[in-house]
Image (tube, grey):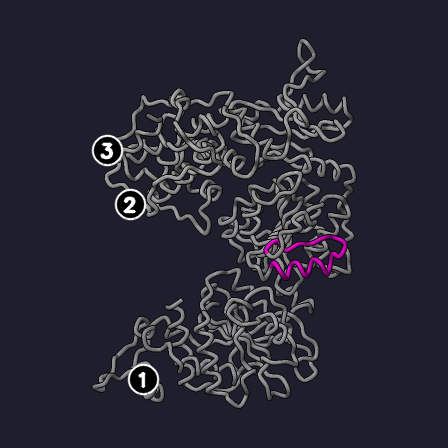
Amino acid sequence: MWNFDYLKQEPAYRGFTDPAIAAEKVYFIDPSSSLINIRKAVEQGLRFIYRQEDIPTGEKDNLISLLRNRELGSILPDGMIYDLDIIRMLGNQAVHTDKTVEKKRVLQAFLALFEFLDWIAYSYSRADNDVWDPDRRFNVDLLMQSPGSVSRTREPVKTEAKSEEPPKLPDLQNRKKEDYPLAPKEAETRKLYIDLMLENAGWKKDTNWLEEVPVSPMPTKSGKGNADYVLYGQDGKPLAILEAKKTTADLAKGRQQAALYADALEKQYGHRPVIFLSNGVETRIVDGEYPERKIADVYSPRDLDKLFNLRSRKQHLTPAHSSDRIAGRYYQKQAITAVCELLERKKRKALLVMATGSGKTRTAAALIDWLVQKSWVRNVLFLADRKMLVSQAKAAMEANLPDLSVTNLCEDKSNPDARIVVSTYQTIMNCVDTTSDTSGRIFTPGHFDLIVCDEVHRSIYNKYRDIFNYFDAPMVGLTATPKEEVDRNTYQLFELNDGNPTFAYSLEDGVKDHYLVSYETVETGTKFIQEGIHFDDLTEAEQEDYEERFADENGILPEKIDSTELNKTLFNRDTIRKVLGLLMEHGLHVDCGSRLGKTIIFARNHDHAEKILEVFHQEYPELGNDFAQIIDFQAYDPETLKRSFADPDKMPQIAISVDMLDTGVDVPSVLNLVFFKKVLSRTKFWQMIGRGTRLCEGLIDGKNKQKFLIFDFLNNFEFFRTNPHPAEPSGTVSVQSIIFATLFRMTWRLQA
């Protein structure tokens, strides 16, 4: 008989019941193997909850990702996630180290697992098979029974759980999950939480971590006190105090006491230690640099060494005399000054709104350079949401900051301790628990002193909030979205009032200062999109075209074509032919008007791009095969194609892009943009516009580039309620072209 046998009554529980019982069977002879199975049972239990609650698991469904899904926190009882995270950390020790796990810690893990699976039984038992018993308790004595002949192994005991996912349980008991009676957390459990947190951060008990350290003088009758935990540096000086409180206690109760300990140690050693406050569930830091705040874990020894090293050399940031070589334009220097003033006011979040082409990355590089000079920063994390943007950011950092080591974590994980780590959000998230050296984990909460987020917005935060909650560092966000268009949630993320970023430099500002060029939009009417097509409203010529297109085999003509019918009938080669005709006739040209200027056509997908290219070759065979080319991730060598496109003297003139040229590509010679897809992201919309804003000298018959055109056939400007530069096409457009361009816009609007 085992503690988890009762769960066998419900076959749907088998995925976590089998490893839980397997863990009990091997505890007597192999606690580490037992712990691995406990961890497996937790992982399977969480997957069961996700299925019952219809919570998507996302790209990764490993234990850490399952635990950190914010929806889970609203389902499990308070504090239970922390219990399960302790099991995760203990399981990692058992799997990744040769250190034997103490039996008392495995016992604590069993108690947490029992409460977790008991809560599942309470919350998800079927009405006809109620396996939950309010009087059931975990029996430690059962763990002491000999399991017989069981081989010692560090691998999880194999179970017979079925690989397929069990169905949802029908007719569940109508119980409120929040009413589940939680067991009280004892002092021993609280201490386990804190001890594991310290070990996970690289501290070694009785070496650089001591407990119950006598401290004096204190305002007590005896004049003495005992600090719960003191963490020491290599020179024997205290780096930090950790004041521990009961799990249910408010951390504020330990704030004054810890401050008094810090006062006493400062008098004794000549420097003030950092203060950590923890109840095992929540941990906070008081570092004297910024206001008290919540952190994911205590700092590692090298985090604190770095903090004190920087503190000893820190200088004032203002007035900011950042490098003119890196970012010498007046507004770039204003942006850097704005961030520096904010940091000196003890604020930790800044949002820079700067139009594409105004040098956001160079501004960030100059800011990093200045913060490093003034000893505010040593390690920097630069985040972007696409690998291509990460590669470009790395190149920019290396070019502008040659004295600082830079690594692209997406391509090379051999130098994670570089001064500047450039990464996608997903890559750094996956590296937190897996990247280490001889001193322990590298990406600890205090490793980075600054985080720069390229094109940050609320959806990025929602998807990757764990990164921002884990790393304890000031954050600077960069975006090209105009400040009026930045959503209010993004402002809230950076603790700013709506419409008031830390600094803003608009496209209009750039045009006025002659740093950027503006655009005109080439659009036709939107009447057909809103109302469909009525035969009686058309001119005679339009009616003829209408009859040719929409009469059925019996010659019967519908009075009206609504949007649904148009969606079925008009997405075809003829539509593409008409759109290309508008571009070739009315796009901006070079070489005395003989050649279309550099053009990006933003296609919906690869198949769409192939169809555009096919129609182009049919309509304009005299221009050759190289005039228009597809540049997307399916190309054999897209980087070479991009370089050729960026050269005004090389082909192609038309780049048909699928996501690859939407962002982060610098091609000053671009004169025409064709929005041939619906854009639903405001951030991406402005990034796409930014492909044409850069200056280019001598581009059009020896004259500088003055503007670029945007052909928007999908009503993207209308969708985002912004169309500041309307312009009619030069020359006369045929009625048929207007009809087909309009129908095309409507069709794609419906399909997107």
Q: Which residue is mark 3?
A: 129
Q: CA distance from mark 3 to mark 2?
A: 16 Å
Q: Toward which corner of the image does residue 653 lie, by quadrant?
A: bottom right
Asked if 629 appears above or below 172 in the picture, the reply is below
Whether residue 113 is visible: yes
Q: Which residue is mark 1?
A: 549
Question: Can you give x and y, in whole percent of width and height, for residue 616 in the image?
Answer: 48, 83
Question: Can you give x and y, in whole percent of width and height, for residue 543 in the image?
Answer: 32, 86
Q: Residue at image x 24%, y 41%?
A: 170
Q: Is residue 281 magenta?
A: no
Sequence-earlier tag: 1 or 3: 3
Q: Nearer the viewer, mark 1 or mark 2?
A: 2
Secondary element under disc 1, as helix, strand or loop, is helix
Q: Which residue is mark 2?
A: 167
Q: Which residues are magenta?
A: 390-410
Q: Amino acid at mark 3?
A: Asn
Q: Callout 2: 10 Å neighbours few (<14), some, many (20+)? A: few
Q: Callout 3: 10 Å neighbours few (<14), some, many (20+)? A: few
Residue 531 appears left or right of 214? left
Q: Amino acid at mark 2?
A: Pro
Q: Residue at image x 54%, y 87%?
A: 624
Q: Is residue 394 magenta?
A: yes
Asked if 630 appears above or below 370 in the picture, the reply is below
Q: CA distance from mark 1 to mark 2?
A: 51 Å
